[in-house]
Image (cartoon, rainbow, N blue to C red):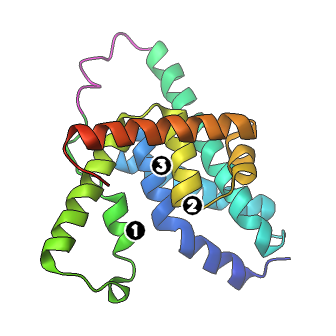
């Protein structure tokens, strides 16, 4: 059973990554914050008494479901209003920097030249841009497997699909990212 302190520590450890993951899906900072907050509240209310080892899987599943719920509510709301395409134009233009933020968590662990650092940042920015272009399921599988470092079974459980589907989504995501990077002359 997770203590209040363990639950609090867990939520603090996942908040930034959860926000960036939600932001990749919904592309709206306020909505992403709401989704993460709702997910954290649901975890605390319904699963706070679970063992600490179960919290990551439960939270990822709740976050996925909350994101899907947001899209369903949005679709329903838009169906009841006249054509909103002019209101749903391009995003705010805000730059998403999930990999930068993720890697900047402990900069003291990296020693590299300014040139290497600049090149790495260029590659990371390009990956961020290309991640946004992936289909939602591929992006989700990729982020869970390689960013959240879940294994195939955990990712399948979080996404509500089979292990084979996770492998296929990840394979396609990696292929698309590699192709896009090569097209830009980046050998990552």
Q: Which mark is residue 148?
A: 2
The residue depicted at 48 percent of the width and 14 percent of the height is: 79
Camera-nearest residue between 52 and 80: 52
Label 3: how many Cα within 10 Å (few below 14, some 14–19, many 20+): many
Q: CB of mark 3 within 8 Å of CB of mark 1? A: no
Chain-order first, disc 2 or disc 3: 3
Task: Give the image location of residue 182, x and y in percent.
Answer: 27, 42
* Numbered disc in front, either 3 or 1: 1
Is 83 within the magenta? yes
Q: Count numbered badges in the picture.
A: 3
Distance between mark 2 and mark 1 Cα atoms: 11 Å
Q: Is residue 155 left or right of residue 180?
A: right
Q: Secondary structure at mark 2?
A: loop
Magenta stretch bounds: 81-90
What residue does disc 3 label? 22
Residue 175's place in the image compared with 63, above or below, is above
x and y, in percent, of residue 128 in the image: 32, 50
């Amino acid at each position: 059973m997770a203590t209040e302190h363990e639950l609090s520590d867990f939520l603090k450890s996942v908040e930034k990554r959860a926000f960036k993951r939600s932001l990749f899906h919904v592309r709206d900072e306020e909505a992403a914050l709401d989704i993460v907050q709702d997910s954290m509240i649901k975890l605390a209310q319904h699963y706070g008494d679970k063992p600490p080892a179960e919290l990551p899987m439960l939270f990822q599943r709740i976050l996925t479901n909350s994101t899907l719920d947001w899209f369903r509510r949005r679709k329903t709301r838009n169906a009841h209003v006249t054509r909103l395409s002019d209101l749903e134009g391009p995003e705010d233009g805000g730059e998403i920097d999930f990999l930068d933020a993720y890697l900047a968590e402990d900069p003291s662990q990296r020693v590299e030249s300014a040139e290497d650092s600049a090149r790495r940042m260029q590659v990371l920015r390009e990956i961020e841009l290309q991640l946004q272009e992936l289909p939602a399921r591929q992006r989700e599988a990729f982020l869970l497997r390689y960013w959240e470092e879940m294994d195939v079974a955990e990712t399948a459980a979080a996404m509500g699909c089979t292990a084979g589907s996770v492998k296929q989504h990840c394979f396609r995501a990696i292929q698309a990212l590699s192709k896009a990077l090569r097209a830009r002359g980046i050998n990552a």
